[in-house]
Image: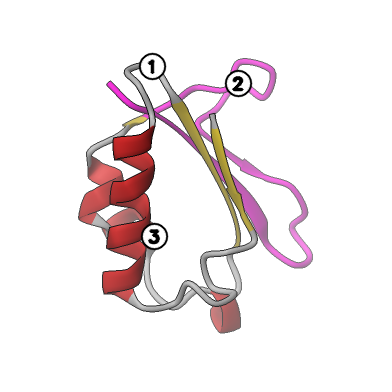
Amino acid sequence: LIICNGVFGWGLDDRADCERAFDCCFDALRPSGELVIGWNDVAQHRPFNLASLQSLARFEPLRFEPLGSTRHLANADNGPVYNFYVRP
């Protein structure tokens, strides 16, 4: 399990840096390993569409059963979101 919380949009802002970081996450995880990305879905902390990254396309969305979804909006007021992925 890799938890990447509060990094995207808070220093990890360049597309190429994000591609490298999430490619490294993929490489570090064994098959069925999970990646959780916590980020803020607000303009000042969303440098680009997270879903547009090719490195994340290597993963499959993971349905986090306790929440019943692959994505969780924790607080609508300030936009914290958690995306769940699994390495195939």
Which is in the foreground here, disc 1 or disc 3? 1
Position of 74 with respect to 16 (left or right) is right
Q: Which residue is mark 2?
A: 68
Question: What amino acid type should be assigned to the residue bearing mark 2?
Answer: Gly
Name the residue located 43 percent from the left edge and 23 percent from the top edge.
Answer: 33
Residue 50 - label: 3
Q: Which residue is mark 1?
A: 32
- From this view, report whether residue 65 is shown above or below residue 71: above
Asked whether the beta carbons under mark 1 and mark 3 sit within 8 Å of each other, the answer is no
**Residue 51 lies in quadrant:** bottom left
Mark 3–mark 2 distance (CA, rounded to whole Å) = 21 Å
- Measuring from the top left, give residue 37's x and y in whole percent: 54, 47
- State which region is magenta: 61-88
Circle 3 sits in a helix, a strand or a loop, which is it? Answer: helix
64 part of magenta stretch: yes
- Measuring from the top left, give residue 38's x and y in whole percent: 61, 51
Which is in the foreground here, disc 2 or disc 1? 1
Which is in the foreground here, disc 3 or disc 2? 3
